[in-house]
Amino acid sequence: MAGIIFCEATELYNLLNQYTRYSRLTEPIYLYLVGPAIQYATLLEVVSLQPIRVLNGGYEFFSACYPFFRTQKLFYVPQELDAFEPYPVEILPAKLYMGDFKQASNKQVEKNLKIKAYLNLCHAKEIIITEENITAVLHIPSSEETNFLSHFRMTCGFLDEQLDKGTVLVFSTLGISRCCTIVMAYLIHSQKISLKDSWAHVQKCKATIRPHRDFVHQLSKWEEVILKKNGTDVSDPYY
């Protein structure tokens, strides 16, 4: 038996928003349990090769956190699931999100996630701000050759300030390298955790992260600056 795992609302939100070619909603792995969830999960555990996830707080709590995912439908047709547009992943619940340029340009995403500020890491792409409730936009034109180490202190200061005011979205063109690098640097700074732990957290939120190799070495140097020691071996192929 694979066992039963209790899943927090943020974890389920991020699972639903993982994306490769198609949305993960197209995979036959999600079951909405109505009623005694533990009882049903125990029955499923016997025949499942994968852990059975039980949502802490249940559907009502999840839909209260993410009302825009709530639906009255009992079934979706495959075409509707294929067309599902994933949201930015949630790094810090209801505070810090990470995504790509397309998501940052989506006004419905801005409204539903209550975005108040943006940290834009695209090379030359500006998002159009039409809402008066956006408090700040920091644009750092960047590429794979960018020395982010020289920007980490500024971006961490920006995130500290803006997260005190509301929700922030950090984004880059594809949402898998530059934005991940800045988010990891911020977690090292704000939570005083190692690069290893920061990497594990961000990868749990978004499985497809691929920070450029130079950025990984810059993060290692940042870890040494913040924690006064270099505790993560970035020569490990895992990184």
Image: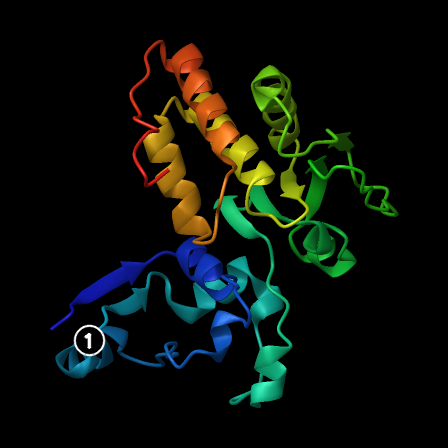
- Residue 93 seen in the figure: no
Relative to 7, residue 194 above or below: above
> Is 145 left, or right, of 1 in this rendering?
right
Q: How many marks?
A: 1
Q: Which residue is painted at 43% across and 11% down in the image?
A: 225
Q: Which residue is painted at 69% across and 36% down in the image?
A: 121
Name the one closer to the observer, 34 or 207. 207
Relative to 235, residue 96 above or below: below
Q: Which residue is painted at 56% across and 19% down in the image?
A: 149
Q: What is the three-letter code of the residue carrying label 1?
A: Leu
Task: Residue 176: give x, y in percent of width and height.
Answer: 55, 47
Secondary element under disc 1, as helix, strand or loop, is: loop
Rendered-image quadrant of the C terminus? top left
Q: Which residue is painted at 76% across and 31% down in the image?
A: 139
> Is 235 left, or right, of 20 in this rendering?
left
Residue 28, quarter of the rendered image = bottom left
Relative to 53, residue 31 above or below: below
* Residue bearing mark 1: 49
